Image (cartoon, rainbow, N blue to C red):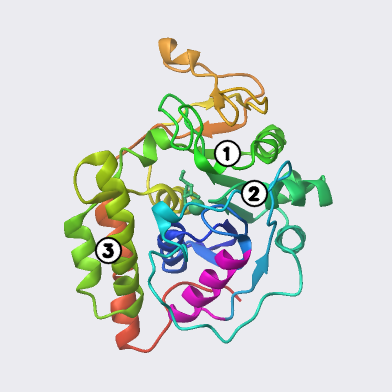
Amino acid sequence: MTSFPFYLDCDTGIDDALALAYLLASPQADVRGIGAVSGNVSAAVGARNTLDLLELAGHAHIPVALGAHDPLAGSFGGGAPWVHGANGIGEVELSMAAAGLAPETAAEMLVRLAQEHPGTLRVLAIGPLTNIAEALRLEPSLPQLVAEITIMGGAALAPGNLTPVAEANIANDPEAAALVLSADWNVTLVPLDVTMTNVLEENHRQELLASSGAVPRALGEMLGYYFRFYEGLFGRACSAMHDPLAAALAVGAVTPAVAPVVHVDVDTTSGPSRGQTVCDLRGLYMDYPEQPGARCRVVLALEGDFAPHLVETLLAYSSAAAASEPVGATVA
Ligand code: RIB
Ligand code: CA
């Protein structure tokens, strides 16, 4: 199976932790570097969580770079402890990794990796887009160097989750999102329309908790916290799967059922729709005819059920732990 170099940008967070573990266990992905950005937690706490998770998963060699603390305009708002816990990973205590931070910023890491892997690097962004915007400012030809970028963010036809119309990753840095979504590259946008309708249930969490692998068990414990937040929305213990679903789409392991390529704008005004992703979905009435110049594939629905695939992939850590081997592919 072909494996592609990946740069992951995240605000590690419970669903970011799931996405990271999923990506490491996916044979299609060769994670070459990870940048942390403020979102669910500060960039510094997100980087700490990422380092600790990498060590737990047997991938401590993957470099982690500290990214932006503040969005392009304004300052970090303090994260979402009511969703992810004060430490971002549902108050689960992981052993502190021995590895430290990379000697470069997240934006510098992304630019370096794009230059080292011209035309093949895949970018997966599952937090606010500040680091990606900073990388575009550092290297304006970044869109020509990167094969594609997958972004968990936005709400196309669905309501928002941070404001009535805005999703958290976009709302936490609309200026960065506007810059990234107007750049000349192939974008796959994974909005709330599809992440809120693909749900992980309590039986899935129990499967993770029953695993012999330390990674699935830690994720199952974190999900306990996450499920309590989503119980307030869905009325039962379960959760949306924002970031792992974006990871699965980035590696091509799941197939979109409805994913028109359309123009997307981000509202950067200071009014009530600040942070809204304005997706031109008028083609809905005509089965989405081609929009000249559009580069953004907006995933609105999936083929099949994602949760069983996610759980099966994460449970691969059980057999790897038994064999004392890290899970995941590396390409020399
Ligand atoms: O709105 C959901 C997104 O915001 C996810 O990426 C979650 O981790 C938070 O960053
Ligand atoms: Ca995230």
1 or 3: mark nearer the eye? 1
2 or 3: mark nearer the eye? 3
Q: Is residue 331 left or right of residue 319?
A: right
**Contact between labelled residues 3 and 2, with CB atoms less than 8 Å apart:** no
The location of residue 274, given as percent across then percent down, is 60, 28
Residues shaded magenta: 44-60
Other residues around mark 2 within 10 Å, as few (<14) / some (14–19) / many (≥20)? many
Other residues around mark 3 within 10 Å, as few (<14) / some (14–19) / many (≥20)? some
Circle 1 sits on which residue?
170
Q: Is residue 147 above or below residue 25?
A: above
Circle 2 sits on which residue?
147
1 or 2: mark nearer the eye? 1
Circle 3 sits on which residue?
312
Query: 260 or 40, which is in the foreground?
Result: 40
Identity, as a three-letter code, of the amino acid under mark 1: Ile
- For the point 34% across and 73% down, the residue is 218
- For the point 56% across and 28% down, the residue is 277
The answer to whether residue 327 is magenta is no
The location of residue 234, given as percent across then percent down, is 24, 40
Query: 167 or 120, which is in the foreground?
Result: 167
Identity, as a three-letter code, of the amino acid under mark 3: Glu
Identity, as a three-letter code, of the amino acid under mark 2: Ala
What label does residue 196 carry, if any?
Answer: none
Residue 183 falls in image quadrant: top right
Q: Quadrant of the C terminus?
A: bottom right
